[in-house]
Amino acid sequence: MIRRFLIPSQFLGLSAKLLPWLSSFAALLIAIGLYLALFVVPPDYQQGDTVRIMYVHVPSAWMALNVYLFLAVASAVSLVWRQPLADIAAQAAAPIGAAFTFVCLVSGSLWGRPMWGTWWVWDARLTSVLVLFFLYLGYIALVDAFDDPSRGARAASVLAVVGVINLPIIKFSVDWWNTLHQPASVLRLGAPTIYLSMLIPLLVMAVGFTLLFAALLLLRMRTLLFERRARALRLHSPAAAAARRELVGAPSEVLLRGASKGDR
C-alpha cells in the first residue's frame, strides 16, 4: 500500500479519493472543537475567557513542531533514497507548517498581552518558536534560490535536516531555563494537569488541525505534481524543441554568414 502511494500516478488516484473525506472530517472536528471552546467550556478561574485562545494556540503549536518533523523526515528520505515524491511532500508541507507557526506566534502574543502585560518577550520558548518560523521561511526561499531546481531542493533538504535540532529546544526550553511560558500540561510524564472539560475540546481541535494538515498536504502535493507535469510537457513539446534547435544553431549560422562576406 505504501509502495503504491509512492508512485506519482498511484498517488494522484488515491489522494483524489482521500481528499473529500479528510477535508470533511477536518472541517467537522474544527467546528465542533470551536463550539465547545467558545460556548461549552467554562471560563478559567484565573484567566477568565482569555483562556479560550488556548484552543487555537496549543494545537497550532503542536502542528508547527509535528509538520517540521514531517518536513525533516521527508527531506532525509529525498536526500538518501532520491525519492521524488518525498521531495514534493517536503516542499508541499513547508508553507503549511509556516502558517501553523505564524498562527501559534500571533495567538500566543494575543494570549500573552493580558497575562504577561506585553505582546512579546524574548523568552526561550518564544524565541525558539520564532527560529522555527525562520527555518520554514529559509526552506521555502532555498527551494527557489537556484536556477537548477534539484540544487535548490538539496540545499533546502539539508537545512530541514539540520534544523531538527531546534525541536527539542522548543519542547524542553521551559524545563531547561527559567521562562515565563508555562510548562507542559498535556504532553507530559504522568497524567495531564488540565481539567477533562478543557482537555476534550483541546484534543478535538488537535485532531481537526492534523486532518486539516493532511488535506492541505495532499492538495498541495497534487498541485506540485501537475505543475511538474505541465513543465515537462512544455519542455518536450515540438515548439520548444524547435526553439532549442534554433538557439543552438544560431551561432554557426552567424559565423557562416560572416565568413561568406569575408570571402567576397
Image: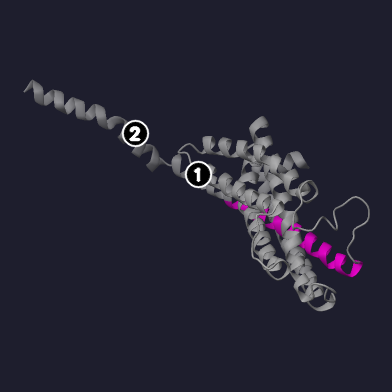
Foreground residue, 72 or 83? 72
Q: Is residue 150 above or below residue 224?
A: above
Crowding at mark 2 (Cα within 10 Å: few <14, some 14-19, many 20+): few
Task: Indicate left or right for 23 with 40 as reference.
Answer: left
Asked if residue 263 is positioned above or below residue 29 in the image, the reply reads above
Give, as a three-letter code, the residue at label 1.
Answer: Asp
Q: Quadrant of the N terminus?
A: top right
Mark 1, residues whose alpha carbon is within 10 Å: few (<14), some, or many (≥20)? Answer: some
Task: Please identify the quadrant where the C terminus is shown.
Answer: top left
Q: Nearer the viewer, residue 178 or 16?
A: 178
Report, in whole angstroms, how far the alpha carbon at label 2 lies from the one at label 1.
27 Å
Is 255 located above or below residue 38 in the figure?
Answer: above
| Labels 2 & 1 near each other (Cβ < 8 A) | no
Circle 2 or circle 1, nearest the eye:
1
Find residue 139 and report its horizontal and vertical position in percent: 58, 44
- Please say if 207 is above or below 143: below
Q: Position of residue 109 (x, y in %)?
A: 66, 64
Identify the magenta region.
196-223
- Disc 1: which residue: 144
Prevailing secondary structure class for the magenta stretch in the rendered image: helix
Residue sitting at 93 percent across and 56 percent down?
191
Please, what is the three-letter code of the amino acid marked with disc 2?
Arg
Lower position in the chain sequence, tag 2 or tag 1: 1
Answer yes or no: is residue 14 visible: no
On residue 245, the disc is 2
Q: Identify which residue is drawn at 34% across, 33% down.
A: 245
Residue furthest to the top: 263
The residue most toward the left is 264
Q: Position of residue 137 (x, y in %)?
A: 57, 49
Q: Nearer the viewer, residue 8 or 173?
A: 173
